[in-house]
Image (cartoon, grey):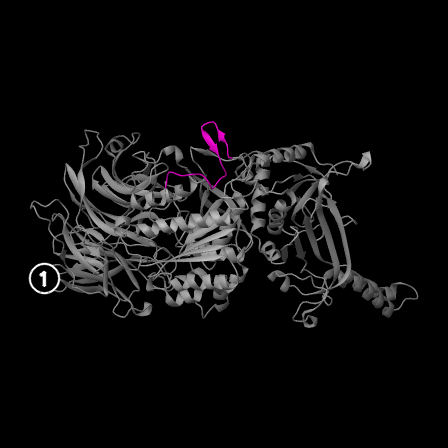
Amino acid sequence: MRLSSALAAHVHKRAYSTAMAGSSSSSGSKTVAPYGTWKSPISADLLAQKRLTFGEIAVVAQQRSHADIAYVENRPWEKGRAALIHQRIALAAPSDGAAVTVEGEGRDVTLGKYNARSGVHEYGGGALAPAQPGSGKVLFSDITSSSVYEAASAASTSTSEESPREVTPTSAVMRYGDFSAHPSQPCFLAAREDHTVDEPARVVNTLVCVDEARRTVHELASGCDFYAAPRFSHDGTLVAWVSWNHPSMPFWATQLWVARFEHDGGTPKLVGTRQVGGQAGGEVLHHPVWAADTNTLYFASDRTGFAQPYAVDVGPDAQLLGPVRPLLAKPVEADFIHPAWTLNNSSFSFLSPDWLACIVTTRAIDGLALVHLPSGQLHALDTPFVTARQLRATSPSSFVFVGSTYAEPDALVAVDVAAVLADPAQKPTWTVIKRSSTIVHDGTVDAAYLSRADTIEFPTELPNGMPATAHAVVYAPKNKDYIAPTGSAPPAIIMSHGGPTAHYGAGLALELQYWTTRGFLVCLVNYGGSTGYGRAYMERLMGTWGQVDVRDCVAAAQYLGSSDHEGIVATAGARAGADRRTLAATKAQRRVSQRGQAELANLEERQLASGAVEITLANTDGGNLFSIGLVDGLLAAVLGAAGHLIPGATVQQGLMAAGAAWLLRKLFHVQEETVKVIPTVGIELTTTRGVRLPSFLTPKSAGANEKGSSSSSSSRRRPFFVASVAGRMIPRDCIMDLVTNEAFSRWRIVDYCAVATRPPPSAKSFSRGSKLEVLFPNLLPRLPVVEHVYRAIYPALFGHDQPAATSSSSSGGINNEKSGHVSLDVAAAPGSSPRADGAKIAIAGGSAGGYSVLCGLCMYPHAFQAGVSRYGVGDLVGLEALSHKFESRYLHQLLGGSPTEIPQVYHDRSPIHAADRIRAPVLFLQGDIDKVVPPSQSEQMYDEIRKRGGKTKYVLYKGEGHGFRDAKHITDALAQEEAWYRDVFKLDE
């Protein structure tokens, strides 16, 4: 059949693009250089030394003209110490219309001596809160001593600094967090975690009241596994709090409680406890906030599938509860709270009795909004911020929060909405109080270097085979000084977030720009199970951790490395666009299909000393001497009945004929096909037919008829009796190009890899049309094999690395011809270039993201060419046994049960038991005092890969826990990762 002129033009264009790939010249003012090799103004030292992260915020005092705030900043240059900073901001009068202004420099309330962090639940949070109103002081937890301190936040009138005062009994085993000060008495509520016996099953969590004057602690509530968010009402007579029990987590199911608080100078206690809502396994209620002057309790609930704000009126004795009512007049598909991995989060705060300031998360993008409480109307605020957290009101028309934009990293920001309250059509004003990094703002790094986030959707497949959609945030490579060679695509880093019940945002993150300015594409995968897309999307991971997340990472990699991904986002309503979208969607699903990945295990690849590449695909479907399929049964039945239908024939003769026909079918069953690429010579295609021997006739060692190979895949195949071997050669001078494509068979879409050929000059004129010669024409493997074969043989065939697989569009079906090969009518379809180089895709992640990395490398050994695991999980049983209390039952929900209930699931989804399948080089980065994922997890995986001869490296950082805080370790980890990619991808060659 003829090769279309469009495809021929494409082949010519590729040859030109390939010639350009090795250039390193200048294009105008830009240097032409390969992706991944660009020089960047963002160094690891610059990131570590000139960047901080923000923790919690507390509003200590509010006046008409100013507000005093305290906030936590984590400083890498002080080995990650969390400093508590006081800052005063001037508030504009509503009539002025001016923005909030910052007064002077912030002051370190902790005097460089304390570390304002909490160790509750290991992840902490809740380390900061305002002390008794009017005192101008703050409460903070010091993680070094595990004590709570009270400190003067506002500038002291004395010339000497006032040291913080310890207000809890000194104890190294008691941890405190999530404070709420009584409005008139010297006491505060706290969530306490007792580590007297430091074993997960014996750690005790309670709700307590701390008497600051006497430094005594009184237990208020106990019996639940976890407590959080204790809050006094405006007059201190009522208390609200949240609790939950194993095996739930605070983002799966919680209970909300209220009770009357009694103190009267004696032992404090709670009286008349009532449950506001929340049933085991069904609903999350969190973030309780009391109204400023009434006994109305506001909170968030995800009963509609999204976490929306609600309210309930509580009687003076806490015994009378009004009906729970939604605050919004119309529900929206957005979340008003973030998952409570840490304590004391704040996503909404009251400006006045009529207005609520809030953070609204829609498809993992945060926005700021106001809720008009009398009408229930939601008013979005027009600001550039796309991530937001720790929102706290500072006046009836202003609030502070931590957020980032597409162009600026995290900053502590004050927002004035006075103009909006007067006229909703107006825009708010905002002032940056402090930046997490100044290198963009002060011009150290020109904004022209920075890549902007692009949110994408891509097709994937659920474990049950159903098609689905997943999400990601993509940062394309960008550097104003460089341009890549025409026709090339960048190496990509597929990142899997931790949690796993969390999500990536889309704000500017300088650590990601470290990669994009060097010419890497970065893809942050918000796989099924991520938050920010509603409860149904989050629950995709229930029972399927290690499957859904990994499939989505693989699907993202294949989508970005595909030349047809833009079909998915074709213009809606256009028939052609819809067809491309459907075709691309099904293609991405085929890439992660279980059958396709299973076929990869039957693929044997050999690099011969001569430089040739030989790839053999074994057929494991049928062909066994004693297997009887549907066709065999029908054939036997028809021929057996011939004894009654054919005159003179007996039943015995019919059965003998059936047996002969059956044996003939078995003898000529295709057992394997081989493609051998001999540089400068051509491609040799071989088809081997025969009968595969049953297992009880198979010797332990390879049989005489089994093709020898050192690869592990061949050792798993059973030998077979060879009936025939047919082969032929396609000369190199007849080969024009190598392409991939799909066609339609009777039952499924068939993917194939084919060689575009021209006939030899001696061919007769009527046979001189070009055609495609399909590789593996009898077995027709699925897409994962097809794309792997393409990547493997292209360099041997053409002498250089391949571009992404190109697709020609088939207008006809597959024709199985007697010659053993397939010819197709083709018509080239215009396709977009891939966004990433399919041969240079890495997967990276930390914690739960590290588990996805290791699972991906095991389950899909050919999907990624490199891996980086930061404190990742390799052994699920070991993790469950050593986990801290907060997450000790987390796996039970993620995997579907405990190790004793479903031991096979824990075994099958633990990368440690499939380390022999890993083909890609793996870098392990680990902290030596990590209690969440102990170092043994990384060490076991490293040892398994190393002893099997795989390429791997293990870096252990002293004094680091779950995440790196020390500047020198942050710097080294980035340097190690960059060197790893450069080496594995051969970027410097």
Label 1 packing within 10 angstroms: few (<14), some (14-19), many (20+): few
Q: Left or right: where does residue 49 sit relative to residue 701?
A: left
Residue identifier under label 1: 265
Q: Is residue 33 magenta?
A: yes
In this view of the protein, which residue sits in the foreground, 720 or 538?
Answer: 720
Q: Left or right: where does residue 976 sit relative to residue 604?
A: left
Read off the magenta span.
24-42
Q: Position of residue 708 (x, y in %)?
A: 67, 62
Q: Can you tell which quarter of the image residue 202 is in?
A: bottom left
Q: Can you tell which quarter of the image residue 464 is in?
A: bottom right
Please tell me which residue is depicted at 70% across the width and 47% down the height of the picture.
683
Q: Residue furthest top?
A: 28
**From what the image shows, is residue 186 above or below residue 52?**
below
Q: Position of residue 827 (x, y in %)?
A: 68, 36
Q: Is residue 552 visible?
A: no
Amino acid at the residue labelled 1: Gly
**From what the image shows, is residue 810 above or below residue 927?**
above
Q: Quadrant of the N terminus?
A: top right
Q: Position of residue 130 (x, y in %)?
A: 18, 50
**From what the image shows, is residue 250 above or below residue 971?**
below
Q: Left or right: where does residue 633 sit relative to residue 279?
A: right
Q: Is residue 206 visible?
A: yes
Dominant secondary structure (helix, strand or loop) of the stretch shown in magenta: loop
Helix, strand, or loop for circle 1?
Answer: loop
**From what the image shows, is residue 160 above or below residue 765?**
below
